Amino acid sequence: MSIWEYANPKLFMQTSGKYLPWFAGLSLITLVAGMIWGYFFTPDAENFGSSVKIIYIHVPSAFVAINAWIMMLITSLVWLIRRHHVSALAAKAAAPIGMTMTLIALFTGAIWGQPMWGTYWAWDPRLTSFLILFLFYLGYIALWEAIDDPDTAADLTSVLCLVGSVFALLSRYAVNFWSQGLHQAASLSVDKEEHVSDVYAWPLWICIIGFVLLFVALVLMRTRTEIRGRRMKALIARERVA
Amino acid sequence: MIAVLIRDMRLAMRAGGGFGLGLAFFLIVVVLVPFGVGPQTALLGKIAPGILWVGALLACLLSLDRIFALDFEDGSLDLLATAPVPLEGVVAMKALAHWLTTGLPLTIAAPFLGVLLNMPQAGYGWLVVTLAVGTPALSFIGTFGAALTVGLKRGGLLLSLLVLPLYVPTLIFGAEALRLGAEGFDNVTPLLMLAGITAGVIALLPFVAAATIRINLR
């Protein structure tokens, strides 16, 4: 059994229907556990006070925001190469979630930045590239909405996603060149030495896992809605003909 | 392909082609800025490089939807797509024609507008150099955006929303090269990056844009 069999919408609906409650439930459990652990059972940081705890939303949402775009890139490629409709619809479903995560990351960052850096917003490379990522999401969603024919829309948005990825990467390096950073370096790492002490790192990892599960659950849910929407359109069209 | 280039140039130059509109827009943007920020020459001189680059970019953006829209409406785009000339070449020529009628005049006019903004002496040469190197990238990226939105009825606003984020790296390196040059610092790195973006965009985007047009004409 290969993964391509899930390109069949019927099989996808069956399987995703079976697993969706698991993803949703697990994400709820991990999020609640991670947040409670993070908010109530970790000490205040030395220089940051309690404000450090926004990290449990800020870092996971930023993580999901970037990886949602990568997922859209992969599903767009799958659509362009193998023309599986489920893949295109999954990319469409992921975009608003990714955009929301980008907004959450920007907002929590601003709330944290006010007391810590003394400003809500700075033209720091990381902040700026996230703002640019937000604009890319916006354009991508707007293009989906603007085109009537679903196949053309899927094709064009996929192309935009590919080209956009290249330019998003370019912008990342351009912005690095253009301004000095205020944002701290990567806080978590799998292979390098951690910048965050273990007390905070464990609940943070749990929150990241929770956000990823939440993302998967939401994408599945929205993809299922899109597929049902397609079926409805087909039914209505058939009724009209009959 | 040369014939396509000449045809597009003629169409753009003749009445109703919108040639000069971009230039006039550029002029107005640059004139409006001092009204907005006040007439202090020191401040204007400091922000002149950025204003001139943003103004040139917006002026470029203004004429993008003309690249394919008219040809799409009267069906000549279908003819061009089925012609024995490769569509990639046609697209590249259309982008080149857009640059010759928008980017090049902007580059030539920019130093005169620099005077209005009290640009530092050292900046004039760099202004022409960075715009000459950077505006082709704006035209080619814009051609891709125009190809994406060619089938849409109200594509104009969407076109700007799609194209502006793609303009970010070009704008950063272009404006940065100009600013460093105008203030007398070493600006080789951003200039090379700008040239790199232009070269890469000219080499690759016509293929993508041609593919997008084929999707839109399907």
Image (cartoon, coloured by chain):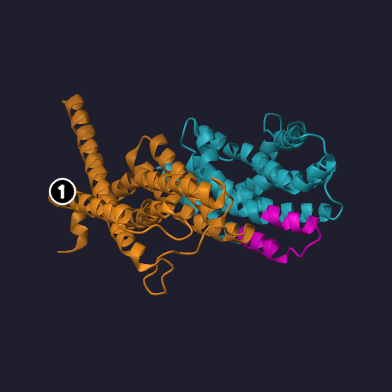
Chain colours: A orange, B cyan
Q: Quadrant of the C terminus of chain B?
A: top left
Q: Main secondary structure of the magenta part?
A: helix
Q: Residue at x 66, y 61 (%)?
A: B195
Q: Along the horizontal axis of the image, is A231 left or right of A211? A: left
Q: Residue B157: in sight, yes or no? A: yes
Q: Which residues are magenta?
A: B174-199
Q: Residue B87: in sight, yes or no? A: no
Q: Nearer the viewer, residue B145 or A29?
A: A29
Give residue A30's position: percent from left, percent from top: 23, 55
Amino acid under disc 1:
Pro
Q: Along the horizontal axis of the image, is A128 left or right of B175? A: left
Q: Reply yes or no: does residue B191 show up in magenta.
A: yes
Q: Reply yes or no: does residue A60 show up in magenta.
A: no
Q: Residue at x 65, y 40 (%)?
A: B58
SS assignment at label 1: helix
Give residue B170's position: percent from left, percent from top: 62, 53
The residue where tag 1 is placed is A21
Give residue A79's position: percent from left, percent from top: 32, 53
Give residue A97's position: percent from left, percent from top: 35, 45
Q: Nearer the viewer, residue A78 or B127?
A: B127
